[in-house]
């Protein structure tokens, strides 16, 4: 179950499935990435410093997101990954951050392996199954079993607002038998991106899944929405810190 919590007095969204782990989705109240809202640059800087201080991390590891299916396991002393839409870490005390404004954010974590990931799945990432590929990479390269992974599918644009034309429908759901994945109205298609990602998780045997019901477009007073704000918007973020005893370098 998702619930609003406070991080140093600022509103964030957490899940009961991972409430003992430093991971959450931010809101407008705790903006960390300004994107086109350059007026928020200073507050982003302040908030990033607060995040690092409170989580006792010197660096934030992040990526230039490009709607690709490129996935990286983070390396020592490398805190920025170009052209990457999923980051995986098994490094103690590393702090991952990725950014969203309608696309589906997914946080993955295996308590058994102390390994986590953040995935950015817009419609292109969902169509190319970046979430599924991330879990396969965790399994094949880090020996993390899907059954040990807890997955949080965070706030994103909902089926209510994700209106597309036939070309997107064709790539995402045309060949799927589940008619609940979309609705058709006036030659437009309204597609459930969160459920499409949930299916990818289930196909690989991930059992512990929490799905946030919030639509970022309907709730643009709380989250940033690229569609609602016609592209001129900042980003909310997904955050996870990998547990460790020492202060990270
Ligand atoms: Zn909506």
Image (spheres, rainbow, N blue to C red):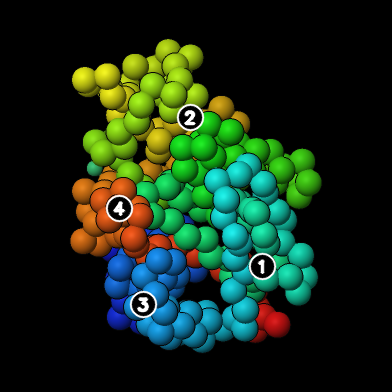
Q: CA distance from mark 1 to mark 4?
A: 28 Å
Secondary structure beneath label 2: helix
* Residue corresponding to mark 4: 230
Left-right relation of 104 to 215: right
Q: Residue at x 41, y 79 (%)?
A: 41
- Nearer-N-terminus badge (2/1): 1
Q: Is residue 5 visible?
A: no
Q: CA distance from mark 4 to mark 2?
A: 29 Å
Mark linked to residue 199: 2
Point out residue 176 in the picture as x, y percentages from the top left corner: 46, 16
Q: In the picture shown, does residue 65 fall above or below 137?
A: below
Disc 3, disc 2: CB below 8 Å?
A: no
* Residue corresponding to mark 1: 80
- Nearer-N-terminus badge (4/2): 2
Disc 4, disc 2: CB below 8 Å?
A: no
Please tell me how crowded label 2 is: few (under 14), some (14-19), or many (20+) other residues with Cα within 10 Å. some
Left-right relation of 216 to 168: left
Disc 2, disc 1: CB below 8 Å?
A: no
Q: Residue at x 50, y 44 (%)?
A: 121
Q: Which of the two marks, 3 or 4, is nearer to us in this view?
A: 4
Where is the C terminus found, in terms of image quarters?
Answer: bottom right
* Residue corresponding to mark 3: 40
- Nearer-N-terminus badge (1/3): 3
- Nearer-N-terminus badge (1/4): 1
- Nearer-N-terminus badge (3/4): 3
Q: Which of the two marks, 3 or 2, is nearer to us in this view?
A: 3
Point out residue 143 in the picture as x, y percentages from the top left corner: 75, 46
Disc 4 residue lies near ligand 1 with CB under 8 A:
no
């Amino acid at each position: 179950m998702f619930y609003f919590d406070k991080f140093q007095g600022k509103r964030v969204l957490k899940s009961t499935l991972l409430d003992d782990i430093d991971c959450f989705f931010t809101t407008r109240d705790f903006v960390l990435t300004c994107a086109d809202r350059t007026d928020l640059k200073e507050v982003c800087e302040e908030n990033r410093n607060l995040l690092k201080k409170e989580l006792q991390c010197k660096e934030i590891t992040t990526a230039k997101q490009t709607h690709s299916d490129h996935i990286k396991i983070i390396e020592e002393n490398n805190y920025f990954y170009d052209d990457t839409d999923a980051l995986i870490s098994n490094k103690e005390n590393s702090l991952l951050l990725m950014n969203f404004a309608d696309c589906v954010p997914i946080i993955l974590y295996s308590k058994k392996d102390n390994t986590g990931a953040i995935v950015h799945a817009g419609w292109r990432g969902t169509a190319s199954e970046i979430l599924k590929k991330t879990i396969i990479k965790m399994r094949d390269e880090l020996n993390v079993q899907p059954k040990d992974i807890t997955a949080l599918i965070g706030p994103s644009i909902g089926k209510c607002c994700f209106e597309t034309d036939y070309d997107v429908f064709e790539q995402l759901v045309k060949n799927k038998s589940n008619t609940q994945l979309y609705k058709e109205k006036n030659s437009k298609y309204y597609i459930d991106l969160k459920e499409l990602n949930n299916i990818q998780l289930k196909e690989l045997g991930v059992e512990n899944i929490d799905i946030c019901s919030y639509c970022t477009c309907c709730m643009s007073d709380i989250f940033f929405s690229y569609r609602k704000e016609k592209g001129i918007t900042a980003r909310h973020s997904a955050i996870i810190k990998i547990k460790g005893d020492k202060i990270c370098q």
